[in-house]
Amino acid sequence: MAPRKKAPKRKIAPFYTAKTPSKMEYAGFWRRFAALLIDGILLSVLFLPLIFILAFAGAVVAIVVWYFLFIIFSVWYEVYFIGKYGATYGKKWMDLKVVGEKGQVIGYKGAFIRWIGRLIVGFTFFIGYLLILFTERKQGLHDKIAGTVVVNGKTEFDDKYY
């Protein structure tokens, strides 16, 4: 009886299979800015009714509670969608996605580190975003901290929900 041949191991395709890292098309500043603007408008519209509801509790309490809930939801929104799909709604609508420097999925941990980087950029009066204009791979400070790039292209998000 002849020994059985082992089946070759299947390779799991990386998140960004269309192009190799050297051929990735990096997203520019204005497309990324538009995606950020879309996300900001979306989150603001979702939270606008809440400020009116909380206004009955008193002005100071309403502002504090609203701001706290807005920050918590904003963190969840970015970490969940970028960690799972590689794009928030704004990025999806602009056909952008966030991947690791080699084109891999960054996951929730990478998305959270990227969010921490965005927080740091906020402390620099958003100057860290201007790095996108001057770096070869169009990375902002938050991208460099997290080891990510934003590329043009569709995500798994598109296939599942649109």
Image: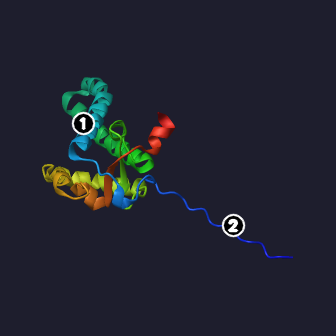
Q: How many numbered dots are placed on residues in this image?
A: 2
Residue 53 sits in quarter: top left
Nearer to us in this view, 38 or 68: 38
Q: Amino acid at mark 2?
A: Ala
Foreground tag (2 vs 1): 2
Q: Is residue 23 above or below residue 2?
A: above
Asked if residue 58 can be seen in this view, the reply is: yes
Q: Residue at x 47, y 33 (%)?
A: 162
Q: Residue at x 40, y 44 (%)?
A: 81
Can residue 101 be seen by looking at this rendering? no
Q: Residues within 10 Å of mark 1 (few under 14, many from 20)?
A: some
- SS type, badge 2: loop
Q: Of 113 and 64, which appears nearest the observer?
A: 113
Residue behind mark 1: 37
- Measure the C-alpha gap from mark 2 to mark 1: 49 Å
Question: What coloring was used for the rendering?
Answer: rainbow
The residue closer to the viewer here, 68 or 156, is 156
Q: Mark 2 sits on what residue?
A: 7
List x then y, in percent, for residue 139. 24, 55
Q: Is residue 73 above or below residue 1?
A: above
Residue occupying the point 26% across, 36% down: 40
* Amino acid identity at mark 1: Leu
